[in-house]
Image (tube, grey):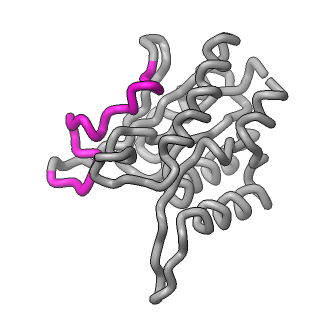
């Protein structure tokens, strides 16, 4: 377990109630992410925070230096925990994430956060491509409903479809409690 890092992706204020881009289930996901965070801190295991910021102030959400772009308070990083600020969907693209994980001698990543169908999907696939063993705490992730070609897809189904695809070939997808029972 010592070569495992918890990566918390984009659990920022704009995704919560009253934010500019509220997701479904964000509070529940944050509670589960908080359980993972607490355990990793208690065991002295590495935690990496990913924070998305759009490059311009006219962004639809996560505008630079805004309250909405800040990490949700219960999940706020500690001084010694790396924070990777990204401007792309994939947390590895144009960031120091890979070099940070390599410096920490990480071979396994446990991923949680938002959005299931965007940043969680992208970071998991990229991590797998880089050779990391990947796990996702599916109940510590959140997303929103989508629409495509006139078909409304509820958030629960969006989340399930992406978790099923990632579980098929990219990651071990399990509940927070199942993951914690193995730590």
Residue 69 magenta-highlighted: yes
At 24% from the left and 47% from the top, the residue drawn is: 55
Where residue 30 appears, x then y in whole percent?
A: 52, 36
At 61% from the left and 60% from the top, the residue drawn is: 159
**Viewer-side residue, 80 vs 129:** 80
Give the position of the C terminus as an image quadrant: top right
Where residue 182 appears, x then y in whole percent?
A: 84, 28
Direction right: furthest residue: 182
The magenta region covers 58-77
At 38% from the left and 39% from the top, the residue drawn is: 12
**Viewer-side residue, 56 vs 67:** 67
Q: Is residue 42 left or right of residue 173?
A: left
Where residue 59 appears, x then y in whole percent?
A: 22, 54
Res 17 visible = yes
Query: Compared with residue 111, is residue 146 higher up or lower down, i.e. above or below?
Result: below
Direction left: furthest residue: 58
Give the position of the N terminus as an image quadrant: top right
Q: Main secondary structure of the magenta part?
A: loop
Where residue 5 appears, x then y in whole percent?
A: 65, 27
How many labels, in total?
0
Residue 2 magenta-highlighted: no
Query: Compared with residue 145, is residue 33 higher up or lower down, i.e. above or below?
Result: above
Res 119 visible = no
Give the image quarter of residue 163: bottom right
């Amino acid at each position: 377990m010592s070569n495992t890092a918890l990566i918390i992706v984009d659990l920022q204020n704009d995704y919560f109630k009253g934010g500019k881009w509220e997701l479904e289930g964000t509070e529940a996901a944050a509670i589960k992410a908080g359980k993972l965070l607490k355990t990793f801190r208690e065991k002295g295991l590495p935690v990496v925070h990913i924070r998305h910021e759009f490059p311009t102030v006219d962004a639809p959400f996560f505008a630079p230096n805004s309250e909405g772009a800040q990490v949700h308070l219960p999940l706020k990083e500690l001084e010694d925990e790396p924070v990777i600020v990204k401007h792309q969907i994939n947390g590895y693209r144009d960031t120091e994430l890979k070099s940070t994980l390599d410096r920490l001698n990480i071979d396994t990543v446990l991923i949680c956060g938002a959005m299931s169908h965007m940043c969680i999907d992208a970071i998991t696939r990229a991590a797998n491509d880089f050779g990391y063993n990947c796990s996702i705490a599916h109940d510590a992730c959140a997303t929103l409903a989508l629409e495509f070609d006139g078909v409304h897809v509820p958030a629960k189904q969006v989340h399930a479809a992406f978790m099923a695809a990632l579980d098929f070939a990219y990651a071990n997808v399990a509940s927070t409690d199942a993951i914690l029972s193995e730590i």
